Image (cartoon, helix red, strand yellow):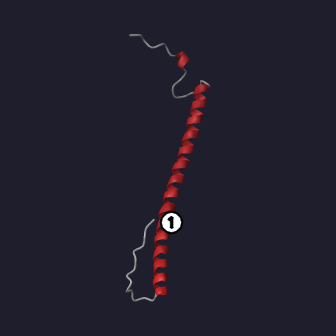
């Protein structure tokens, strides 16, 4: 949270006008903060969606591997045992 600078006591504006100026400054800062938070939220939502897609793909591959239908590695039972040293 940003703190607004204090106005000098000898300000030329009437007190009500000073309050309005301070409120306008606060509103401007809040608008900037909301805009930044909105951009960050959008970025995080995209990342979450990408991660969900990745998890679904990994679940599909894991299920296929568990069922022996993995296209990438083949069937491990058909491979010869590794040589012993």
| Residue that appears at 53% across and 47% down | 50
Q: Is residue 11 visible?
A: yes
The picture quadrant where one finds residue 82 is top left
Q: Give the image location of residue 36, x and y in percent.
A: 47, 63
Residue lying farthest top? 84
18 left or right, relative to 67: left
Q: Note whether 73 is above or below 31 in the view shown.
A: above
Dot 1 corresponds to which residue? 34
On-image quarter of the C terminus: top left
Q: Is the N terminus in the top left, top right, bottom left or bottom right quadrant?
A: bottom left
Please tell me whether residue 31 is drawn above or below residue 83 in the rendered image. Answer: below
In the image, 21 versus 39, the foreground residue is 21
In the depicted structure, whether residue 39 falls above or below residue 63: below
Q: Quadrant of residue 54?
A: top right
Q: Residue 39 appears at what percent x and percent y?
A: 49, 60
Q: Which residue is drawn at 62% across and 25% down?
A: 67
Residue at 51%, 25% (x, y): give it.
73
Q: Is mark 1 on a helix, strand or loop?
A: helix
- Comparing 23 with 49, the one in front is 23
* Image position of 30 (left or right of 12): right
Residue count near mark 1 (Cα–Cα under 10 Å), binned few <14, some 14–19, many ≥20: few
Q: Which residue lies furthest to the front in this view?
A: 9
Q: Percent x, y for residue 5? A: 39, 74
**In the rendered view, would you say 1 is above or below 84?**
below
């Amino acid at each position: 949270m940003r703190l607004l600078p204090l106005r000098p006591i000898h300000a030329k504006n009437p007190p009500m006008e000073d309050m309005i100026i301070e409120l306008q400054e606060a509103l401007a800062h809040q608008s900037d903060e909301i805009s930044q938070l909105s951009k960050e939220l959008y970025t995080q939502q995209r990342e979450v969606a990408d991660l969900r897609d990745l998890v679904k793909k990994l679940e599909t591959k894991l299920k296929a591997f568990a069922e022996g239908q993995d296209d990438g590695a083949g069937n491990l039972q058909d491979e010869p045992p590794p040589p012993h040293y």
